[in-house]
Image (spheres, helix red, strand yellow):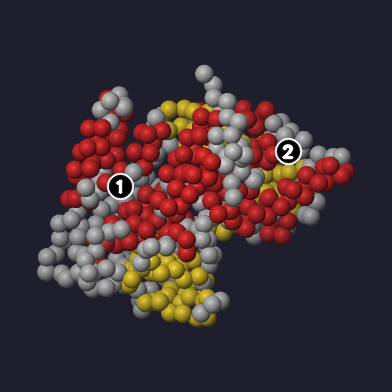
Amino acid sequence: MLLAYVCGMCRWKVSFDCFSRTCFLNSTRFLFPSKRRQVLTRHLHLSCIYTSGEKSVNSSKKPVLHPKITILGGGFGGLYTALFLSRYPWTRLTRPKITLVDRSERFVFLPMLYELAFGQLDKWQVAPTFSQLLQGTDIDFVLGQVEKVDVQGSTCEIFSTKHGHKVLQHDRLVIAIGTEPSLSSVPGADKYTLPFRTLEHAELLKQKLANLTKIRRQQGREPIIFVIGGSYSGVELASNVAEYFQGKAKVYIVDRGSRLLDAASDHNRNIALQTLRSWNVETLLGMEVSCVTEDAVLLKSVEEPFQEPQKKFDVDLVLWTAGFKPSSWLSFVELEKDSTGRILTSSTLQANGHEDIFVLGDAAAVTDVNGQKCKATAQVAIQQAQCAAWNIWASLCNKKPIPFRYEHLGELMTLGKYNGTAEVFGIPLSGTSAQVTRRLAYLYRMPTHLHRWKVGQNWVLKPVGCLFDNFSFPL
C-alpha cells in the first residue's frame, strides 16, 4: 500500500523516460492487484502528456536564450519549481539563470512542524537551509524581502539586509508567496495568540510548552490551553498538545462550524475525534472568539453573536489555526485577484493576461482542468510546481504547455508521537501504522535526495525519539 502511495507521487518523475515508465508498470504486475495497477497506470499515464507536449507550438518562434527566471517564495511551490526546472533538459544556449527569493534562510517542511514543536525531530530535519538544499545546483538564492513587482517592466525589487536594495529582471516570474495569520478582526488576537504556521511559531510553542510544564509542577495546577480552529491543523495541534501533557492539562478546541474536520474523510474524522475524547479534549462548536486578553478568552455564539453575557474562560495559552489570508504584499501586485486576494490564473497556472507570470500555492486561485478548485495544501503546491516547471520550460523552448490536473493522493494526519490516521487510495489506516506511513511518505517528499538520505539515516540510527522507537504493531 505504501509503495502504491509513493509510486503515485512519483508519476511525474518518469516524464522523460518512456522505457522506465513501461518497466515500472511491468514491475507492479506481481505487487498490486489489477484495480490498484489501474490506478497506478492512470497516474503514470499523465506523464505521457509531457511527451506529447514536446511538439513545438510554432516552429518559427525561436526559444529564449539564457532566460532569467525569478521565483518569489521558497515554500513547497517555489522551491520545488526551482528544483524541477534545474533538472530539465536545457541546451547550452537555453539554460536559464534561476533565482529563488525568500525572506528566511530556511525551507520549512510545514506538515512536520508538529514533530519539531513537540521535540520529536530536530530543526535541521524539518527546516534545512536553502544553501544546503541548493548545493550542487545552478540555482541562486537571495535572502530578502520582496518590495515591489513591476508587471509591465518585468522587474522585482528586493531588499536584502546583506546587499541592500536589489532589482531583478526576469523573462519568467513565479509568485509562490505564502499566507499570513488573519488576526485583525479579533481584538487582542495579534498580541495574545500564537499562530502555528512558521518555524518561529513552532520554536516559540516549544518554549511555551516547557514553561507551562514548569508552572504545572510549581503551582500544582493544570494549564489551560485553547486551540482556535477545528480544521486539520487545529485538530492535529490539539491532539499533540493533549498528549504532551498526558491528560494533565485542560485543552479546548473552538470552531464556528457544527463539527470538526468538516473537509476530512469519515475515517480520519472518526479516528481524530476518538483521540480527542481519549485525552478529554473539550470541543466548543458553533462558537467564535470575540476577544483575547493576556489571561482570558471570550467566546460568543455564531447563531446569536449579540447574546449577553459572552462566555469567558481563563487561559494560559491560545493557539491560532482558524484563519490565514494571502500575504498582504500581494495586494500591491497589479494582477487580477479573487475576493480573497489570491491571484487568478488560467489552467496552465499563468496569471490572467500575463503569459510570463506563473502563480501557485497559497498565492493562487486555481481551478484545474477538471473544474476542481484547488486548496492551499502542500500536496497541491508540489503538484502545481511540477506543472509550472514544465510550462515555464515549454514557454521558453517553444513547446506545448499542459493544464494543471490535481490528483488527490490521500490524507495523512498526526495525532501524537506514535499515533495518526490516514486514508491512502481509499485504504484506511490508524495508530502507529498510519504514523509510519505518514513519516515515510513525507520522507519521500523531502526536497532533495541528499536531505532525504540524511533524515532517513537519522531516523533509523537514532534510537530515542525516532520513528521506530517503542512502536508496537498490532497483529
Mark 2 Cα within 10 Å, few/some/many (few <14, many 20+)?
some
Q: For the N terminus, give its image quadrant.
A: top left
- Label 2: element kind: loop
**On screen, 449 above or below 351?**
above
Q: Which amino acid does label 2 sit on?
A: Phe
- Going by the image, does 336 lie left or right of 147? left
Q: Which residue lies furthest to the right in this view?
A: 219
Label 2 vs 1, first from the N-terminus: 1
Which residue is rendered at x = 30% and y = 24% of the image? 33
Q: Nearer the viewer, residue 257 or 220?
A: 220
Q: What residue type is labelled 1?
A: Trp
**On screen, 244 above or below 202?**
above
- Marker disc for residue 245: 2
Where, by quadrant of the figure, is residue 284 drawn? top right
Q: Which residue lies furthest to the top in this view?
A: 475
Where, by quadrant of the figure, is residue 258 drawn? top right
State the residue position of label 1. Answer: 12
- Is residue 336 something that shows in the picture? no
* Residue 296 spot, x, y in % from top left: 79, 49
- Is residue 283 something that shows in the picture? yes
